[in-house]
Image (cartoon, rainbow, N blue to C red):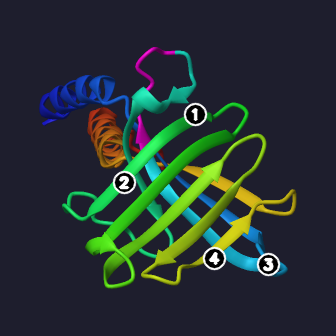
Amino acid sequence: MFKKIAVALLALSALNGQAAEQAYEFSYTGGELVGGGWDANVSTGGKFIVDDLNGDGVFTLPEVKSFSYRFPTVPHCEEATITCELSNFRYDPKGSVLTLDYEHSHRIGNGSPPFDGGYISERISVTSGYSSWGHYFDLGEGSYTIYTMTPDTTFAITAVPEPHSYLMLGVGLLAIGAMRRRAKRATPTIAKAI
C-alpha cells in the first residue's frame, strides 16, 4: 500500500511541476459615481489565470491564460455578437499592483441605433493615471454608469488554489497517515512490570 502511495505522490509531483498556472480573484470596492457622489458599497472584480512563462515573477498580457470580469454579468465571449478584449495587463504579486484594460461589448440587432439595435458594453481600466469601471448602454439615446477609483477605493486580490493543489494535499495527508500506521505496527509492545 505504501509503495502505491509513493508512486502516486511522484506522479502528482510531476504533474504539479508542469502545472505552474496560478489563479487570482480581484475586487475593487467603493467608487466615485461620475455625475454623482461617493458610493462605499459599489464593487466590481473578476478572476484571471496566469502562467509566469519568463520566470520574472511579474505577469504580463502574453502570460494571461484566461480572464473573466463581472459587471454586472459574466459575458459569453464565444458568441458572435459579443467581443471581449483584454488589451493591457500587468500584475506584480510582490507589490500587489494590478494594471489592466478590458472591454466586453454585446451587439444587439445589427448594432445601428436607434432602429436596428445598438451596443451594451462594460469596461474596466486600471492605470497609474486614471482608473474606472463602467456600464455603457447605447440603443439610440445612450446612457452610462461610470465609477472612478479614488484613494478610498479598496483593492483586494487573493490567490485561488487550483484543484491539483488540493489533490496534492490530500495525497500527502494520506501518505503521512499510512506512515504513522506502519510505524505504530512496527513498534513492539513492552509488557508493564507488575
Circle nearer the N terminus (1, 4): 1
Residue under label 1, please give it.
Answer: 90
Q: Nearer the viewer, residue 184 or 191?
A: 184
SS at badge 4:
strand
Where in the figure is residue 158, as x and y percent of width and height? 58, 51
Real-space Cα separation, disc 3 to disc 4, in angstroms: 9 Å
Looking at the image, residue 61 lies above or below residue 40: above
Segment colored magenta:
49-55
Residue under label 4, please give it.
Answer: 145
Circle nearer the N terminus (2, 4): 2
Circle nearer the N terminus (3, 2): 3
Q: Which mark is residue 84?
A: 2
Q: Are marks 3 and 1 in contact (CB under 8 Å)?
A: no
Q: Nearer the viewer, residue 172 or 98?
A: 98
Question: Mark 3 packing: few (<14 Cα in 10 Å), some, or many (20+)?
Answer: few
Q: Are marks 3 and 4 in contact (CB under 8 Å)?
A: no
SS at badge 3:
loop
